[in-house]
Image: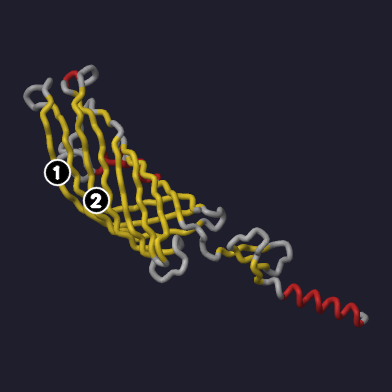
């Protein structure tokens, strides 16, 4: 092997050593390209998100008859704020967890299941502050979050319970006000840019108030007003999925 071949091989070796960890600026992305021993493969490591706003949905709340849209905004180096207006409809999970006085629910409450009642469109609102301790990358890490929540469910009750199919209806409602403390983890997907996942668990207190019209015990064709209110501890689990920009 002559001296020119030795110099050429040494130059190739030195160049390859310098590209093990270099900033990929071909598309101005926030990634680091890291080459391994195989010349045909590489992996990309995230260097924190550049997103300042995230819009999210919370699919598990659909079973509560609640469809909020979350808007999260960075406010400083360790904190974000989030609000979530939404619409409500039939609360499916209430039939399992909280109904009813007859003993059909896992946790019996003064709420009653009324045959012939129909759910209308209501509204909800949530607001929270997220604190990300010990991280320089907001929207990427563990957070603590106090949250307030209010849900209004609109329900129509038959004025004649014995003939619910053709009777006129009387408007009623169920309201749920909650104070929560959540522990969660939010992060951008490793595979899809600007796709965020936000897992959380928490505890809180929920007040439920309702105005119902239930069949009279002695006159089946008459609907009696039933106004109830109660407060219980609550536990929370969910995942929000959203897009950042």
Residue beneath the point at 24% across and 50% down: 178
Quarter of the figure with the N terminus: bottom right
| Residue 77 location (% of width, % of height) | 42, 67
**Residue 154 located left or right of residue 72:** left
Res 20 → quadrant: bottom right
Q: Residues within 10 Å of mark 2 (few under 14, many from 20)?
A: some
> Which residue sits furthest top?
166
Q: Is residue 167 above or below residue 54?
A: above
**How far is the residue under mark 1 from the one under mark 2?**
13 Å
Query: In terms of secondary structure, where does tag 2 sit?
Result: strand
Q: Which residue is mark 1?
A: 229
**Residue 232 located left or right of residue 184:** left
Considering only order in the chain, which callout, 2 or 1, is on the residue closer to the N terminus? 2
Residue beneath the point at 47% across and 66% down: 137
> Which residue sits furthest left?
218
Query: In terms of secondary structure, where does tag 1 sit?
Result: strand
Res 34 → quadrant: bottom right
| Residue 139 location (% of width, % of height) | 44, 60
Closest to the observer: 15 or 116?
15
| Residue 7 location (% of width, % of height) | 86, 80
Q: Which residue is mark 2?
A: 178
Residue beneath the point at 28% across and 49% down: 149
| Residue 222 location (% of width, % of height) | 11, 23
Closest to the observer: 57 or 166?
57
Q: Is residue 203 above or below residue 124?
A: below
Q: Is residue 22 above or below residue 194?
A: below
Q: Residues within 10 Å of mark 1 (few under 14, many from 20)?
A: some
């Amino acid at each position: 092997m002559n001296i020119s071949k030795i110099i050429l091989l040494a130059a190739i070796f030195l160049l390859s050593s310098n590209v093990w960890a270099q900033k990929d600026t071909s598309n101005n992305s926030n990634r680091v390209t890291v080459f391994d021993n195989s010349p045909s493969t590489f992996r990309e490591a995230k260097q924190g998100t550049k997103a300042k706003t995230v819009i999210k949905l919370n699919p598990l709340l659909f079973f509560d008859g609640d469809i909020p849209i979350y808007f999260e905004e960075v406010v400083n180096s360790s904190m974000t704020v989030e609000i979530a207006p939404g619409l409500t409809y039939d609360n499916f999970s209430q039939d399992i967890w909280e109904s009813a006085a007859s003993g059909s629910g896992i946790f019996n409450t003064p709420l009653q299941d009324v045959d012939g009642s129909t759910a209308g469109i209501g509204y909800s609102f949530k607001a929270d502050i997220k604190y990300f301790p010990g991280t320089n990358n907001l929207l990427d890490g563990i957070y603590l979050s106090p949250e307030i929540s209010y849900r209004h469910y609109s329900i129509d009750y038959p004025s004649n319970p014995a003939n619910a199919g053709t009777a006129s209806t009387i408007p009623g409602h169920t309201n749920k006000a909650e104070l929560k403390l959540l522990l969660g983890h939010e992060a951008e997907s490793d595979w899809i840019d600007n796709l965020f996942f936000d897992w959380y668990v928490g505890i809180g207190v929920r007040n439920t108030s309702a105005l119902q019209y239930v069949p009279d015990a002695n006159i089946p064709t008459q609907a009696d007003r039933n106004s109830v209110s109660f407060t219980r501890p609550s536990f929370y689990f969910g995942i929000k999925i959203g897009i950042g920009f």
